[in-house]
Amino acid sequence: MAHRVTVFTFISESRMEQVDTERRSRLLALKLRALIREHLGLSGDPDGRVEVFAPGAAFITNDAVWLLIDGNAARALGGVLAWGTKFELPIHLVVENDSGLLARRAALFDVDITVWHADERVLLPALAEPHLPTTQAKPEHLAFTELIQSSGADALVEHGIVVGEVRGLEMCRVVDDVVSGVARLEVGMGVNDREAFAMVHGELPTEQALRNVIDAVAIHREPGANVHPFNQFGAERMHRWRALQDPTSIGFSRLDPVDPPVKRTNLKDAVPCAAIGSTDSGNLSAAVFVHGVDLDVVPFAVDTASRLGIDEVTIVARRQDITPSIERLANMASVFVRFAFISSPTA
């Protein structure tokens, strides 16, 4: 009697992810070639070769580098410049979102780069979007700054939003009630945390609730503190807070926080923050703080200087976070970029 044997092959999760990534990469390469073909009016695929490009797809012709970004492109320019310039050819960057932001930042580098917005099968020249206008905080929101400061936090205004930070970590924010429209101070880190805090501790007076939170957070933002979520979030803003206490530590004689060129959308994501002041040599300079290796810190930094209307920016980071690629990007910028290194630990 014959027996049927069924053999099951198990593929690891990591292998499945690799297969999916490779398949996605091939599809993106096909898409990019089709866009180039349509844009150049060719009857067949353009001559050239596909290159592996992690953020999307790359196609190299005899006279250009074509790059397609897959997904969110807002912080892709640093990687594009670091990777694309090695071919010493004009770069054509194709994106489906944030093309105006990228066009504005690309113009701040001495690199032959064109940003295109992909609209279905058509490539449209990206138009550089203007900088965000300065937004003033509402007087009724500013009225909470005394309460924030008396509770032991630093009151800051960023793009018109009044917040309270504990050594760089936002722990309260002034918002308008969605029903009454009346301004109120919410305690917590991020909208979900603020909502949860209100549900659990809603009976506490705002000042007492804020003091309790500040006391709980501050000990974890001290130098040498053990690893804790409170010192893993907002490390770059903690670097800025320390520099504000002692501007000379980064080569400044005066330093004040300033709005970044784009608004933060998520407090838990590591995004550079900014300040402005006078260097020891008397120059007016922006200061951009970063934690971790971030190729896009240079486009962010020069965009910050551009918004402030100045031609010098200082990138403040730990020495190990400034790679040769970042230094090379700084040399491509149309404004003067210098580095200031900090030795303070993460916490």
Image (cartoon, rainbow, N blue to C red):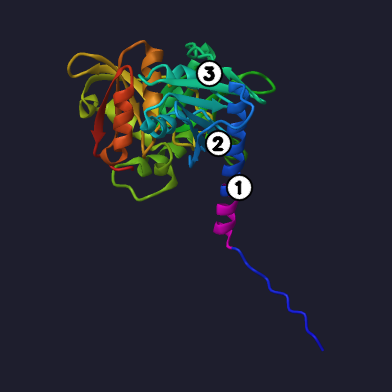
Q: Is mark 1 on a helix, strand or loop?
A: helix
Drawn side of residue 59 relative to residue 7, left or right: left
Please name the amino acid that badge 3 sits on. Gly
User: How far apart are the two marked residues, 3 and 1, measured between alpha carbons?
Assistant: 30 Å
Q: Which residue is depicted at the point 64% across and 27% down?
A: 43
Q: Main secondary structure of the magenta part?
A: helix
* Disc number for residue 23: 1
Residue at numbered disc 2: 204
Label 3: state its secondary structure: helix
Q: Quadrant of the C terminus?
A: top left
Stretch of the chain drawn in magenta: 12-21
Amino acid type, mark 1: Arg
The N terminus: image quadrant: bottom right
Residue located beneath label 3 in the image: 100
Nearest to viewer (mark 3 / mark 1)? 1
Q: Which residue is drawn at 33% across and 33% down?
A: 326
First-in-chain label (2 vs 3): 3
Query: Residue 142 colored magenta?
Result: no
Give whichever of 27, 171 is nearer the camera: 27
Q: How far apart are marks 2 and 1 (CA)?
A: 54 Å
Q: Residues within 10 Å of mark 3 (few under 14, many from 20)?
A: some
Task: Inspect this view and state whether residue 310 appears.
Answer: yes
Query: Is label 2 in contact with label 1 (beta carbons under 8 Å)?
Result: no
Label 2 SS: loop
